[in-house]
Image (cartoon, grey):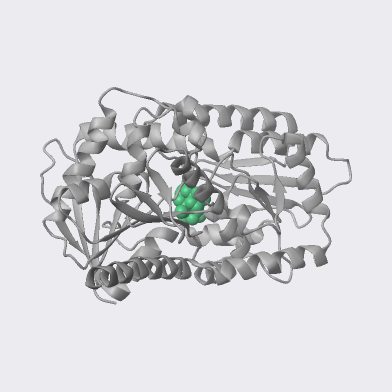
């Protein structure tokens, strides 16, 4: 295929080798195909220049820009993370609408579009990531860019009902239509997006499934993201997770790993673990919960509130249930290195993944990839994680039903080895087969087909 691959994401890995699934995947495909990666530098500068800086990557180039303090507040912390994030996670009640934040958000998108347009070529394949850049294709089109532009939405697509809470709701269809391919995580996200277009005057779904809106025709499709399962499994085997956590041989370990975000259902998870402890019969095995919850977006008030709440619940439960030689909940409010994490997943008898709302949830897939197939742990998974569409062999729970989650913990601990193996085999097959390399390839192939079809149409 011709043309450079051009990736846009909020942050680029300009500080050194990339860590974390998505960034590694994008890094790998840019390294293999060459190309350019645009994104913010991570620097906040009073007079952010209207030009891009160059950082050389491994086989590709990064083009970065600084944000001003006002852009950091209005675009990143404000409209992206205090409006679009809660809206897409069914928490319109947490939206923090501030006059001017939308103007700053669209301003950053326009500024980036202008800087990019000066460098783009007609045959570039542009792949934009996430809600920070929903209007970027529309801004690029306004700058005269005609190249194929794809987008991937890593978080859930809001229902038509929730979308009504967004003051700029009428602009969303036009932003989406400026892309050629609008990628979502799951079938249910696609259904939500199509529902929005169905109720929109002037939009039409064509026989081939694409959508027509005014002079634009584009596709909305699901591309469930995967992980680098082989690398994760390797790390998990090499790390000796059990020796790090100091649990006695007959004690069971439950693990939770989440950025500390209100969408992840951490409060109800802790309560469910508390109820499990309450109902534990005298001779049942002891179990402790290792919850790793690194801080994120701490300057957004809703995140400070959830942190306070978790600390309160953890303190109360530990006060009630701890013994002189045992603390049931270990709550770690900082990031642990990826290799350590892989070993901890493998050491845990249960992976507890209970978000209220999640685009995919990579932790569910990492937990499965890290298990010993001969003696695997049990994945307990929320019905509201996007991953549930691909992982029905997990124990599926409703994260609003604390009793059901507590019962699932009992069921997991009592599960016979044979059933654990059967469930794990099905889950692992999916996780290894549909890994992140396959995800990027499937997405880029779909973009290539769109480009070819457009070329054929132009030549006919
Ligand atoms: C968004 C969507 C979608 C977490 N703590 C540590 C650590 N992590 C890593 C995990 C995992 C990643 O962070 C979290 O990924 P998730 O998918 O669970 O969630 P989000 O961050 O909300 O990601 C989500 C994803 O985008 C991809 O499209 O699945 O739905 O919300 O990889 O392992 N990694 C290390 N230390 C930690 O303490 N090293």
Residue at 46%, 46% in the rendered image: 155
287 or 371: nearer the viewer: 371
Where the N terminus falls, by quadrant?
bottom left
Q: Which x, y percent locates residue 372? A: 67, 68
Q: Is residue 165 above or below residue 332?
A: above
Q: Residue 251 placed where, x, y %?
A: 76, 52
Question: In the rendering, at what x and y percent does residue 369 appear?
Answer: 59, 65
Closest to the observer: 362 or 210?
A: 210
Residue situated furthest top in the rendering = 99
Residue occupying image coordinates x 20% and y 59%: 146
Asked whether, in this view, residue 443 is left or right of residue 330, the answer is: left
Residue 49: image x %, image y %? 10, 44
Name the residue at the front extreme.
Answer: 460
In the image, residue 112 above or below residue 433: above
Determine which quarter of the picture holds residue 374. Answer: bottom right
Residue 397, by quadrant, is top right
Quadrant where the C terminus sits is bottom left
**Nearest to the observer: residue 410 or residue 393:** 393
User: Is any atom of residue 359 visible in this view?
Assistant: no
Observer-nearest of 395 and 441: 441
């Amino acid at each position: 295929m011709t043309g450079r691959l051009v990736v846009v994401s909020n942050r680029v890995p300009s500080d050194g080798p990339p860590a974390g699934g998505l960034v590694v995947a994008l890094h790998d495909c840019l390294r293999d195909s060459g190309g350019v990666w645009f994104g913010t530098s991570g620097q906040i500068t009073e007079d952010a220049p209207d030009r891009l800086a160059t950082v050389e990557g491994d086989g590709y180039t990064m083009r970065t820009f600084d944000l001003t303090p006002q852009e950091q507040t209005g675009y990143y912390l404000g409209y992206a993370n205090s409006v679009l994030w809660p809206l897409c996670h069914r928490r319109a009640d947490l939206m923090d609408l501030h006059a001017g934040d939308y103007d700053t958000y669209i301003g950053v998108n326009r500024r980036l579009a202008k800087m990019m347009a000066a460098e783009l070529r007609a045959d570039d394949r542009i792949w934009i990531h996430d809600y920070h850049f929903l209007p970027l294709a529309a801004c690029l089109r306004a700058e005269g860019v005609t190249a194929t532009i794809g987008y991937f939405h890593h978080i859930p697509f809001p229902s038509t009902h929730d979308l009504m809470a967004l003051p700029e709701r009428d602009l969303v269809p036009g932003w989406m239509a400026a892309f050629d391919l609008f990628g979502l995580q799951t079938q249910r996200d696609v259904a939500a997006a199509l529902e929005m277009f169905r109720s929109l005057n002037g939009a039409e779904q064509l026989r081939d499934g694409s959508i027509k809106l005014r002079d634009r025709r584009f596709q909305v499709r699901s591309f469930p993201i995967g992980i680098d399962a082989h690398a994760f499994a390797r790390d998990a085997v090499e790390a000796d997770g059990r020796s790090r956590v100091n649990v006695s041989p007959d004690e069971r370990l439950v693990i939770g790993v989440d950025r500390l975000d209100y969408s992840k259902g951490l409060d109800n998870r802790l309560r469910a673990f508390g109820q499990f402890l309450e109902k534990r019969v005298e001779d049942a095995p002891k179990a402790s919960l290792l919850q790793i919850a690194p801080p994120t977006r701490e300057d957004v008030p809703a995140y400070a509130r959830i942190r306070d709440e978790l600390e309160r619940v953890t303190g109360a439960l530990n006060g009630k249930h701890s013994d002189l030689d045992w603390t049931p909940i270990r709550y770690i409010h900082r990031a642990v290195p990826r290799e350590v994490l892989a070993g901890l997943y493998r050491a845990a008898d249960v992976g507890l993944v209970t978000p209220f709302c999640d685009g995919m949830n990579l932790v569910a897939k990492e937990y499965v990839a890290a298990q010993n197939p001969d003696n695997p742990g049990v994945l307990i998974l929320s019905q509201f994680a996007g991953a549930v569409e691909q992982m029905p062999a997990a124990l599926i729970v409703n994260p609003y039903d604390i009793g059901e989650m507590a019962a699932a913990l009992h069921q997991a601990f009592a599960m016979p080895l044979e059933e654990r193996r059967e469930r794990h085999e099905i889950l692992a097959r999916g996780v290894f087969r549909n890994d992140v390399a396959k995800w990027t390839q499937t997405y880029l192939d779909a973009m290539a087909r769109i480009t070819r079809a457009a070329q054929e149409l132009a030549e006919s």
